[in-house]
Image: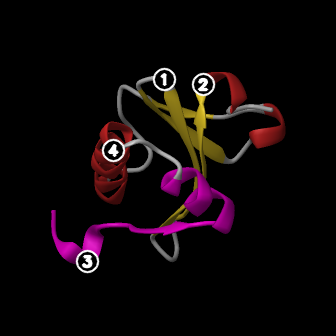
Amino acid sequence: MSEQSRFEVEFTDEAEKHYDALDDNMTRRANAAVERLTENPFFGPNIVKLKGELQGQYRYRVGSYRIVYSVDQQRRVVTVRGIFRRGRAYR
C-alpha cells in the first residue's frame, strides 16, 4: 500500500492517557493494531462499526481491550478516542 493511501492516526487527550497507562505487552499489541488501522480502518476480523450513542465510531478488539475510534475519510485521519478494558468501553 502506498504511503499516500494510508490513514494518519491521531489520539485525543483522553486516548493518550489510556495509552500511557497500558503495560508493556498491551502497548506493543496496541501499536500493532494502530499500524493496521493506517492501512484499513474499516474492515477486519476484530473491527466493528458501533451503533447507538457511539454511532459513526468503530471499535477494534485487541485481547481484553477495545480501541474506540472514528474515521475522517476526506482527511484520511483515524482519531483514537479511547483504549478501554472490555467492560468499560461502552459506558
Q: In this rendering, would 14 be left or right of 60? A: right
Tag 3 or tag 2, which sits nearer the N-term? Answer: 3
> Which residue appears farthest toward the left when viewing the image?
1
The crowding category of the residue bearing disc 4, from other C-alpha atoms within 10 Å (few below 14, some 14 to 19, many at least 20), is few
In the image, residue 74 lies at what x, y percent? 52, 73
Mark nearest the camera among 4 and 2 is 4
Instruction: Say which residue label 2 marks.
Output: 86
Label 1 sits on residue: 64
SS of the residue under disc 3: helix
Q: Distance between the residues labelled 1 and 4?
A: 15 Å
Look at the picture and state if 86 lies above or below 44. above
Q: Which of 6 and 69 is in front in this view?
A: 69
Question: Residue 12 lies in magenta, yes or no?
Answer: yes
Q: Distance from label 2 to label 3 (Cα)?
A: 33 Å
| Residue bearing the label numbered 4 | 24
The amino acid beneath tag 1 is Ser
Residue 91 location (% of width, % of height): 80, 32
Q: Tell me what residue is drawn at x 68 percent, y 59 percent.
A: 14
Pointer 1 or 4: first along the chain: 4
Alpha carbon distance from label 2 to label 1: 6 Å
